[in-house]
Amino acid sequence: METKHIRISDYHYPLPDERIAKFPLARRDQSKLLVYRHGEVSEEVFCHLPQYLPQGALMVFNNTKVIMARIHFRKETGALIEVFLLEPAQPVDYELMFQTTERCEWVCLVGNLKKWKEGKLVREMDVHGKTVRLEATRIGEERTGQRVAFAWNQSDVSFAEILDAVGELPIPPYLNRASQESDKTTYQTVYSKIKGSVAAPTAGLHFTEEVLRDLDAHGIDREEVTLHVGAGTFRPVKSAEIEGHEMHSEYICVHRQTIEKLLRHDCSAIAVGTTSVRTLESLYYIGVKLHDHPDATPDQLHVGQWEPYESTPLLTPQEAMEEILCYLDRNHRSTLQTSTQIIIAPGYDYKIVKILVTNFHQPQSTLLLLVSAFVKGDWRKIYDFALSHDFRFLSYGDSSLLIP
């Protein structure tokens, strides 16, 4: 398979530190917008985005909300331990996790792990006038992190309230700065709703209520999906060929009405951000699985990293979406919930996403591979233009509208 043998060094470009936006602009929608249409590149202001989109098109947003995923504990010895929440372990359902009381378990990254050999970490806090004692106990290694149990002594305090009291926002490591109070607002999209991400779907950070209203006025149909962004999104590709890189698995949730709306729009969509792309494109392969295995469980619907490259399914996108609707009907469900590990790289055949809004990504990253696949390898023209026209890069930077 040619895709597996892509050399990540072919996706390098020089990114000076001063081009990485450390803070967002005061007005989100005044950021620059690079417009790539059929090979031609131009510069715009983001608030003018709606006028470039085809009337009546369907635009899909990721409504995930970044959680206060960093918790700091100080041991009696003075050592500072950082516990970074990655994904829920018990309960595994995100919604239940944030409502849970007294005890829960997470898969976490632990900073200064060598100083936490055994015993409990303890932190006290005030929640609604009550003193809450939070204890963390390390259970053992799990996948790429540590399984950690949390317990607290106030039965009417939820884990969501604890995070709001002591958690810190996990801004990207490449910003090389501590999180600030302003990040709590600026590092969330204006339409964020469902708690669960440890990184923002950053293409959405440019949207304001005014731009959303303008989209409506232009006849753009809006729909939302949920993909909770994991810390693995920042994991660099360290292998020479991408075959050696293991993609992180991420939770996705798509409502029945979204599938129905995709069908009404001929299974064509404008994706806001790479997370929306991964969700939408995964839907096709979930539909293929259900065609072959109608009785599959949610876990069996997980989309593996290389699945799109290992066969050539004969289903149309419409047939794949119909399979998902039949599955929801059979199981009396209103939402599809599973996970995806899909890697989208040159050689990938896009099924649903026809137009993409996305930021400028790190050199040698899987996100850059996704963009290259979308523009049929023409990514250098886009990035050379952005670098030579003073665009700002990465999470708080400017964005692009890609119309192949």
Image (spheres, rainbow, N blue to C red):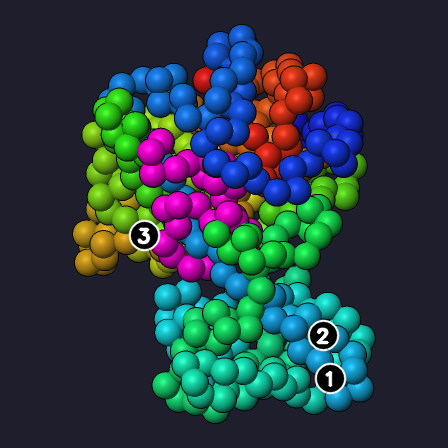
Say the numbered circle drawn on residue 81: 2
| Label 1: how many Cα within 10 Å (few below 14, some 14–19, many 20+) | some
Q: Secondary structure at mark 2?
A: strand
Identity of the residue drawn at 55% across and 73% down: 166
Say the numbered circle drawn on residue 75: 1
The three-letter amino acid code for the residue at tag 3 is Leu
Q: For the residues marked 2 and 3, what is the alpha-carbon distance in whole angstroms?
A: 37 Å
Q: Earlier in the sequence, mark 3 or mark 1?
A: 1
Tag in front: 3 or 1: 1
Q: Earlier in the sequence, mark 2 or mark 3?
A: 2
| Label 2: how many Cα within 10 Å (few below 14, some 14–19, many 20+) | some
Task: From the top left corner, tell me how far across and down residue 290 is, in percent.
Answer: 33, 46
The three-letter amino acid code for the residue at tag 1 is Lys
The residue lying toward the viewer, choosing from 183 and 79, is 183
Q: For the residues marked 2 and 1, what is the alpha-carbon distance in whole angstroms?
A: 7 Å
Check contact, mark 2 vs mark 1: CB within 8 A: yes
* Horizontal side, residue 114 vs residue 178: left or right: right
The residue lying toward the viewer, choosing from 234 and 213, is 213
Task: From the top left corner, tell me how far across and down residue 6 is, in percent.
Answer: 70, 29
In the picture of the structure, the residue carrying the numbered disc 3 is 336
Identity of the residue drawn at 72% across and 74% down: 81
The residue range painted magenta reads: 186-211
Q: Secondary structure at mark 1?
A: loop
